[in-house]
């Protein structure tokens, strides 16, 4: 029996990989009977076709490695959790680019006579909130709660201000953009064990990158002010909301005049390496996702790294994400060259 349902699983993964660059209608796999998923997938493929055309880019190929995270077998039904490591290649102005990202899905496979069908596909969209699409059976706590409380601590780092000296130094501190990029490329797909890991980890990751580039900690001891991090001390998480919550980081960068500072600019073409983009998927003024600029495409547009949905050198506008909507708004921040 296992071999039979795994054959269906292999077919699904092969089709998943193909659909990253092949947007023809026949790319939809008939073994999938989840009509909601089929419609979402079809809409996404049409969007991607337009997206590449508008960017004057041509998708070339996709390479997908799949990790089976969890399997639960029942009578005539199997539920599997999958992680896809996708490398997508595309060409722009005769230059080949490669981006990477990690995606997760939960599949329900059901026996139908002698065949196995994929009867349910639950796609994780953690850029928007840490739940599965149309999946109340595996829903997580509310996004607002997760954005303000980490789920686990991998270590107990403590950033001693007397040692770092940031608050006391009167010298200008340069922002080493390349160091921020190097950190982002090193840790985009796994957490740095020297820091707490959050379920919604995008802003924590961006803050770590800024810190690696030399951005000075501004410790106030109050979570609602400053930009600081200490880790878990005596069972309590010690970090400012601006360190770990997208909306709070956006507010901090918009107003800070000391320590970590930034200038809001009007478009992505004004950004440099190590700059920051924040995303408001619903256009209601509440920012839910944060990324850092780590490269540029052949047309000079930013490519970004992120976590939560781990991404490396992803095109900045995120229109390939299920989180993106027609109402999406962006904030573009150019980080100061000196602090």
Image (cartoon, rainbow, N blue to C red):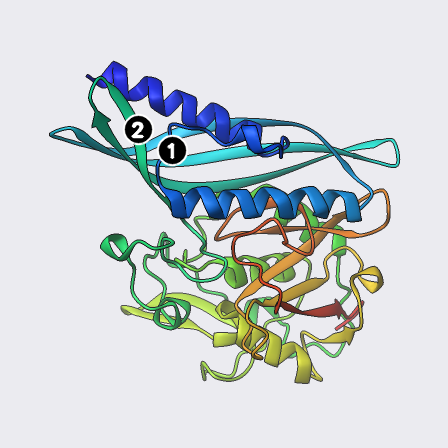
| Quadrant location, the N terminus | top left
Q: Residue at x 84, y 64 (%)?
A: 270
Disc 1: which residue: 32
Do the CB atoms of the residues marked 2 and 1 lie less than 8 Å apart?
A: yes
Question: Seen in the image, is 198 located left or right of residue 300?
Answer: left
Question: Seen in the image, is 236 located left or right of residue 251?
Answer: left
Q: Residue at x 73, y 70 (%)?
A: 333
| Above or below, comparing residue 23 to residue 114 in the picture | below
Q: CA distance from mark 2 to mark 1?
A: 6 Å
Q: Farthest left residue?
A: 75
> What x and y, as percent, mark residue 137?
23, 54
Q: Dot 1 lies on which element?
A: loop
| Above or below, comparing residue 300 to residue 161 in the picture | above
Q: Residue at x 41, y 56 (%)?
A: 197
Local crowd size for mark 2, using a 10 Å CA cut-off: few (<14), some (14–19), many (≥20): many
> What x and y, as percent, mark residue 236?
31, 71
Judge by depth and name the residue closer to the eye, 338 or 151.
151
Judge by depth and name the residue closer to the eye, 135 or 276.
135
Question: Seen in the image, is 32 located left or right of residue 39?
Answer: left
> Is residue 189 in view?
no
The total of numbered circles placed on residues is 2
Among numbered discs 2 and 1, the one appearing first in the sequence: 1
Local crowd size for mark 1, using a 10 Å CA cut-off: few (<14), some (14–19), many (≥20): some
Disc assigned to residue 138: none
Q: Dot 2 lies on which element?
A: strand
Disc assigned to residue 117: 2
Q: Residue at x 34, y 22 (%)?
A: 8
């Amino acid at each position: 029996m296992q071999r039979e349902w795994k054959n269906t699983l292999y077919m699904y993964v092969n089709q998943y990989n193909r659909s990253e660059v092949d947007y023809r209608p026949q790319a939809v796999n008939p073994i999938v009977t989840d009509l909601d998923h089929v419609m979402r997938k079809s809409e996404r493929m049409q969007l991607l076709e337009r997206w590449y055309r508008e960017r004057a880019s041509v998708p070339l190929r996709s390479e997908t490695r799949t990790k089976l995270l969890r399997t639960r077998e029942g009578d005539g039904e199997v539920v599997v959790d999958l992680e896809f490591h996708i490398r997508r290649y595309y060409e722009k102005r005769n230059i080949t680019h490669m981006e990477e990202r990690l995606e997760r899905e939960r599949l329900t496979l059901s026996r139908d006579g002698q065949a196995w069908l994929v009867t349910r596909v639950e796609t994780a969209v953690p850029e928007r909130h840490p739940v599965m699409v149309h999946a109340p059976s595996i829903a997580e706590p509310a996004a607002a709660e997760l954005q303000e409380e980490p789920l686990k601590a991998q270590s107990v780092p403590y950033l001693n201000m007397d040692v770092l000296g940031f608050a006391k130094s009167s010298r200008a501190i340069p922002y080493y953009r390349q160091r921020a990029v190097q950190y982002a490329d090193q840790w985009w797909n796994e957490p740095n064990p020297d820091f707490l890991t959050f379920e919604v980890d995008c802003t924590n990751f961006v803050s770590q990158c800024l810190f690696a580039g030399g951005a000075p900690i501004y410790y106030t001891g109050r979570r609602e002010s400053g930009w600081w991090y200490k880790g878990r001390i005596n069972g309590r998480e010690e970090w400012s909301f601006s360190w770990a919550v997208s909306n709070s980081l956006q507010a901090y960068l918009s107003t800070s005049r000391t320590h970590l500072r930034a200038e809001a600019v009007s478009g992505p073409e004004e950004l440099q390496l190590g700059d920051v983009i924040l995303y408001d998927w619903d256009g209601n003024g509440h920012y839910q996702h944060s990324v850092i600029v780590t490269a540029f495409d052949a047309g000079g547009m930013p490519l970004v790294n992120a976590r939560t949905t781990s991404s490396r050198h992803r095109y900045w506008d995120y229109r390939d994400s299920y989180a993106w909507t027609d109402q999406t708004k962006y904030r573009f921040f150019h980080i100061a060259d000196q602090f």
